[in-house]
Amino acid sequence: MKVQQGCWLLLLWLLSSAQPLFAREPLTIHVQAAEGPFKSGFVNALQAGDPNIRIAPSGEHAELIVALGDDAFSRATRHDKPVLGVFVSRRLEEKLRRKGCHCAAVWAGVALNDQLAMLQLMMPVAAKVGVIIGKNSAWSEGSVKDYGGRLGLTLFQIGDQAELGRVLREELETLDALVLPVDESLFGPDSAKLVLLTSYRQRRPVFGPEQSYVHAGSAASLFASGGDLVSETLIQLDSFRARHRFRRSGFVHTPSVIVNEHVANSFDMRFHDSEALREALEVMP
């Protein structure tokens, strides 16, 4: 969850200009996360977006806890306080909620339908798209099966990286493109070389799962930026203050987009830069 300082400064300016929209009672929260630039930037952006937010030094002194990442989320739910997880795995949030925690989450990654809509803009003639998911993926088997768009999806459920390599070698050439979810255990740095080299050799583009893959050779991806996460958190906190309960857990509603211009050009895709694709996504119905 690395966000450059310039992004935070822009977000702070945008949020501070909207302060009159927030005429709410004070809300005291504790932000649980590893100390560092992301936590400090996140806290500053929250307070710029809603001046009525008060930051408590610990969970014991807060009305609720905002936890950044899976580890912090797991620890925070041990307190007898409402917890909002931010950029946490969908499976972890659903597991803890089944155990009875008073919690909700902004899931890591973006919605499958959003990523597929972006793929269609980039490759209008694509018809057969592979979707690979593992046990810790942001997307579920049900979300793939429930897809109702025009693309023909082929689901591959993978248990480990060895199986991932086999599927790529045997199945990728039958597809027009491949789309990947956020899944740190399956699509981490170790597997990026395998996925992207196979994609390059077989001339089949990969979309997703996030920024680092695009920098490494994925064609494009929607992703949840630091600013996107702050905006979604503010919506959740405002709902909690008004109704004493969170909104339903989910992905960010307005993700950011990034394009690898070299890869997009090599595949002669419709959009070759991030700004043009972002503008096209904004006017979609």
Image (spheres, rainbow, N blue to C red):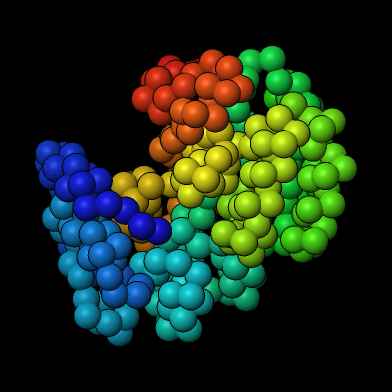
Q: Position of residue 126 (x, y in %)?
A: 71, 20
> Which of the image's four quarters has the N terminus?
bottom left
Which image quadrant for residue 155? top right
Q: Position of residue 249 (x, y in %)?
A: 52, 54
Residue, far right? 170
Q: Nearer the viewer, residue 221 or 149?
A: 221
In the rendered structure, the answer to whether residue 27 lies left or right of residue 254 reads left
Residue occupying image coordinates x 60% and y 37%: 207
Residue 97 vs 137, above or below: the answer is: below
Q: Position of residue 237 (x, y in %)?
A: 33, 56
Residue 166 vs 91, above or below: the answer is: above
Residue occupying image coordinates x 32% and y 80%: 59
Q: Position of residue 72 (x, y in %)?
A: 43, 75
Q: Nearer the viewer, residue 125 or 273?
A: 273
Residue, far front? 201
In the rendered structure, the answer to whether residue 281 lies left or right of residue 232 reads right
Q: Nearer the viewer, residue 239 or 207?
A: 207
Q: Is residue 173 visible?
A: yes
Q: Nearer the viewer, residue 23 or 186?
A: 186
Residue 141 vs 67, above or below: the answer is: above
Residue occupying image coordinates x 30% and y 62%: 38
Residue occupying image coordinates x 23% and y 59%: 41
Count how many numbered circles sit on residues in the image: 0
Q: Is residue 248 visible?
A: no
In the rendered structure, the answer to whether residue 50 lies left or right of residue 162 reads left
